[in-house]
Amino acid sequence: MKKHTKLIAVVTSGVMSVSALGLVGCTSGRYTPDRLEELGHNLALSLMGNDVFAWNAFSVTPYESFGYVSSGDPSWYSYYGQRTAKELSMVNYLFDMYYSEFSHYKLSDMKGTSAATYRSIQYILNTYRSYYKSKYAPTFELLGGNYISSEGGYVADFAMSFENFELRSEKDVTTLLAVTQSTGEAFKTYLNFAGDRDKAGYPLYDYTVSSMRDYLIDVYEKGDEYYIYDIADNKIENAAFLSQEKKTAYKQVFKTAIQDNYMSGVKALYDGLEDYVGKAETVHKSYLASAGAAGRAYYEWLFRQKTGIANVSVGSVYKELHAATETYKDKQDAVLAEIDALELTDKATYDEFYEYYDETKSLLNLTDPNEIIEYLKVAAKDIVPDLSTEPDIAFKYMDDTVSEITNAVAYYMRTPIDQENSRETITLNGYQMENNPSDLLTTIAHEGYPGHLYAHVKSKEVGTSLLSTCFGSLAFSEGWANYVELALLDNIAKTSDTAVAKYCEYKKYRTLFGYVNTLLWDININYLGVTATELGDSTMIEMLMEIPAVYVPYGYGMYTMYNLHETAKKSLGSKYSETELNGALLSEGYAPTLDRAKQITDAYIKRAK
């Protein structure tokens, strides 16, 4: 089973810093929808702060479109140490100020996008106020760090962000250069993070440290052959607003910055991390389990933050999901038993099925990404409403350094909110594609049509606010993208021969079982305190220990979305319309909370009866 890692929004990777908060005064007057929209807009500005990569990704003209004004020198993410009680109290106070303003509004007064903005503000304020009001907030700060990870942490994030940073003006060039020059010192601060974890009693595991060092030395030893050099040259060469003289000069200063800052930071981090090998004495319990009550509280917060479910009981969710996995396992086993019974009576069907099962044959024999996306644009008509304008979609590939360490088959970067008819790009992992050909069709459906790409373009057509677009529920967005894989498999099965139809049925239940079962492992290891030895040591278990709740959006999101559709089908029978329900679910933008998705589904069922 592959984890489809989404690198959709840099801005959603962490909790806001104190410097990122600045409450902008709202206009005077009654608490109208317009004033609420302004409040939501100001909250988005505060949350995004001076994150130049986020602004570059989400807006072509951030000042003209959203009033963003940069402040200070642009730099890469550094670790500044645990925040003091005074700093945490200040952030909590500022959230309370937003909440005090928000409490004057009534949802019943809001319609359309204003109602969606209301729910987004409510979701965000409830989430982060609960974080900063927790007595465990200082511990949350350490447990939630992802500066160092087995997949490269924020060092790998820089390479991805650098590659996807758009140069639209000379200001963008100087901004990217300044951030690149800051990486040397920024990367070194991650050693302070490792040190603080160690002092607090949560030292990084050898798996994390060793995997991180393997990644770092691989980057460093590539030297001048590392792909960022070529990316920098190509970006500068294609910057039409620069003269040839300036292009030559900028190419040289970028080369120097990568050599003297980025690479030196990579080497310093590699060398320094050696001191943290062997620090963890207990390696069979996750960081969160080792933290006791604080760890459980943090997992509960993560679950609420990722799903938008305010009063979730993780224990109840666990029981519910455990029963579901038994059902999915029984159904996939039933398909295998049915196919195995054909070995003597219908060998051709049996053999074809197992070609897909063994991942030696691609579904529908589709192997070219461009052919797949054209197929999906047609197939999606049975799943989602048509977009107003069909987007132009392109593909590119990850660098080998990244593709071999990540289990992401692909990712989609959302285009700027203020850019119409933009070219959409899906980045593919050539290494994973070669080793998992049967996943390519569903992966492009997940990332592109009718998954993330479709949902984002639809959200722009709807006119979703900056806040709702950038800070929506991750469980909805991932649950949606995972669900459309299942819907596609159902559609293929309806018009295919027995081998393909049965494989689609099997793959649907295997996908459900795989994601939900992995989430059960996550809950076991990070919330219930089950040891890795009890579960069966594996790379997947180690990754879950390192990045708790990472499968909540995928597992619980998909489980919820699948059940909402099944409920609607059973309630409506022949009156059920897949496209109408999905149109309703996406009518409020990219990612409402799962609680809201349930309300939308209930309302659809009531209307359709």
Image: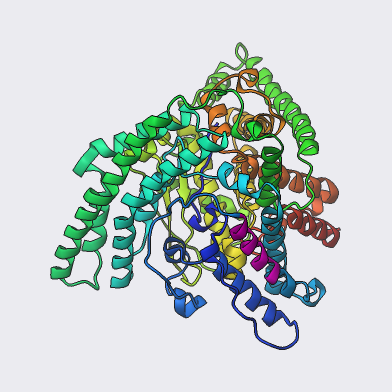
Q: Could one spot residue 505 in this view of the protein?
A: no
**Which quarter of the rendered picture does the C terminus lie within?**
bottom right
- At 29% from the left and 66% from the top, the residue drawn is 173
Side (left or right) of 457 relative to 218: right
* In the foreground, 193 or 513: 193
Question: Please, which residue is most extreme toward the bottom here?
Answer: 29
Characterize the magenta stretch by its predominant secondary structure: helix
The x, y position of residue 29, in whole percent, is: 72, 88
Colour theme: rainbow
In this view, 540 is above or below 65: above
**Which quarter of the rendered picture does the N terminus lie within?**
top right
The x, y position of residue 426, in whole percent, is: 43, 51
- Identify the image quadrant of residue 192: top left
Indicate whether residue 117 is drawn in magenta.
no
- Identify the image quadrant of residue 95: bottom right
The x, y position of residue 253, in whole percent, is: 19, 59
Which residues, given as a range, are shown in magenta? Answer: 85-97
